[in-house]
Amino acid sequence: MSRKNKTAPVRRNAHKTRPEARCALWLARHPGFLAAPSALAASVIELGPTTTGSLAAGTLAAGLGWYRAHPGSFSRIAAPRLRATRRRWTRYIGRSWKTSLDFCNLTVDDRRTGEILVPRLLKVASPTPSIDVLRVAIRKGQSVTTFRDAQEELASALGADAISIEKEKPRVLRITLVFGNPFDDIVPPADIPGDPSEVDLTALELGDTEYGEVWTEPLLGQHWLISGGTGSGKGSLLWNPLRAMGPMIRDRIVRVWVIDPKGGMETERGKPLFHRHASPADEEVEYDDGDGPEDIDPMLALLYEFRDRMRERQDRLRREGKRKFTPSAETPFEVLMIDELMMLTALAGRRVISEVNKVLAEILTQGRAAGYAVIAYVQEPTKDIVPVRDLFTRRISLRTGAASFVDMVLGEGARDRGALADEIPETGAEGIGFRTTETSRQPVRVRAGYSTDDDIDELVRLCTPHDDPPADTNVYHLAA
Ligand SMILES: Nc1ncnc2c1ncn2[C@@H]1O[C@H](COP(=O)(O)OP(=O)(O)OP(=O)(O)O)[C@@H](O)[C@H]1O
């Protein structure tokens, strides 16, 4: 219920909370407000101002030292807490919080007392510089719908670009706010390293994170699922890993297999780079699964071949007693890219759909240790369309067509934690999306580097595989 009872009779001061009681309640909810100055005063009295000053300076220096020595763990652990405290006391301080809600008709008039009741801010989390998550206790008569009806006004009052409001439990809402666009400019494509020793298959450059850091993802020992609506920029996430692995493709330490069910439009330009390429434009292929040869879909044939080579590699590793695979020109790291998986797993003929899902499940469950990785691109990540969805180990969501797709890709609760991929604008934000970190389930905003046709031509010119693999690059040692 918003403030719609303005004309109703009011019994002033009945059960109105006294200011002293309100103050005591507030202090009980914010113990740090008294505890911090009390601790400081006690320290000055007990230890003296010099020791207290030294302790404070020491704490500050330790924080700075942590930031300098391990910026990654600092921005993961300390920065969100510091940022949340700062925002709690600046962006969402009492009076401005009340005014914002008041302007959006999200406060409630208590007719008995004449008090204006403001939904209470229970907690502010600020996991990344551009995402705030607020836990809010609503007032009697309000519901998640009251807030959702005013969500555009609330986003504008709080200065957010995107907002999501969910019910966490009765009378507690979780309001996720995304601020600004940290990617003003188009991000350049990943650099093509000069030499295979400069390639790190455990950290391939894909673009930038919202922290202004290089966005990398591991591919060795992983499978990627990339989800995004039409025109969201999935192509960038096809060309960037190829650029980042370029010299290894050239030296045949990495071999790329491509299935392009969209007819080869996206991948045609890079064809010289690929070890195998199949699209509906290709002729049917003769394949013998033991029951005699038959003509089958060229894309299915490529998938079978990839699976069969994987099985051979597994046998070989087993025979040699190796549990770990090391990429080399003799035993290359094999990467299968499937552009628009949906066309094979949902829109093809019944036999192809069932075979693709079966073979893909085998590759996804067994390929990692043998050096076989899959990167699949999909517009709709539902279970009907991608039954093998959960077998992908790294997942990225670009702009999606539905809010429900976000959690399907990034895991349950990802949207509530700030991955508002369905709120990414259709134009001017191509290549922008969310990933979750390996160590926490916290989403981080990212933008993929953009490869123009010239960039793709450069990649083909520099990294088309040699006819013969060079003898001296037979074994590749993982970059540190
Ligand atoms: N990283 C990027 N940065 C800026 N603009 C980009 C980026 N990636 C793509 N674009 C722009 O968006 C357009 C659509 O990109 P792309 O073809 O990769 O989308 P898609 O997700 O593959 O779409 P579809 O599924 O329909 O093929 C491109 O033509 C380009 O203009």
Image: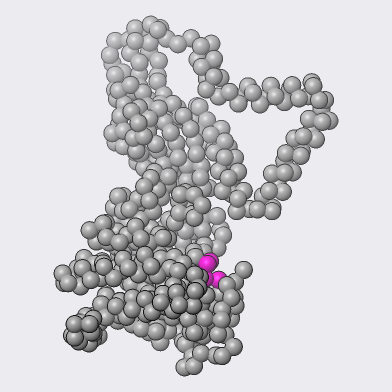
Residue 365 seen: yes
Please tell me which residue lies in front, 14 or 470.
470
Above or below residue 406? Residue 288 is below
Query: Is residue 19 shown left or right of residue 35?
Result: left
Magenta stretch: helix, strand or loop mostly: loop
Residue 213 location (% of width, % of height):
56, 60
Residue 302 location (% of width, % of height):
30, 80
Q: Residue at x 51, y 48 (%)?
A: 128
Q: Is residue 6 magenta?
A: no
* Quarter of the figure that contains the C terminus: bottom right
Please tell me which residue lies in front, 194 or 284.
284
Query: Is residue 241 shown left or right of residue 378?
Result: right
Residue 33 location (% of width, % of height):
61, 24
Query: Is residue 44 shown left or right of residue 228?
Result: right
* Quarter of the figure that contains the N terminus: top left
Residue 301 occupies which quadrant of the picture?
bottom left
Determine the residue located farthest toward the bottom in the rendered image: 467
Q: Residue at x 54, y 19 (%)?
A: 28
Please tell me which residue lies in front, 221 or 204.
221
Above or below residue 203? Residue 171 is above
| Colour mode of the rendering | one colour
Determine the residue located farthest toward the left in the rendered image: 350
Q: Residue at x 57, y 85 (%)?
A: 473
Q: Residue at x 31, y 37 (%)?
A: 148
Please tell me which residue lies in front, 30 or 394.
394
Report the span colored magenta: 200-205
Above or below residue 142? Residue 186 is below
Residue 194 location (% of width, % of height):
58, 80
Residue 236 seen: no
Q: How many numbered circles does the render carry?
A: 0
Above or below residue 108? Residue 322 is below
Residue 290 occupies which quadrant of the picture?
bottom left
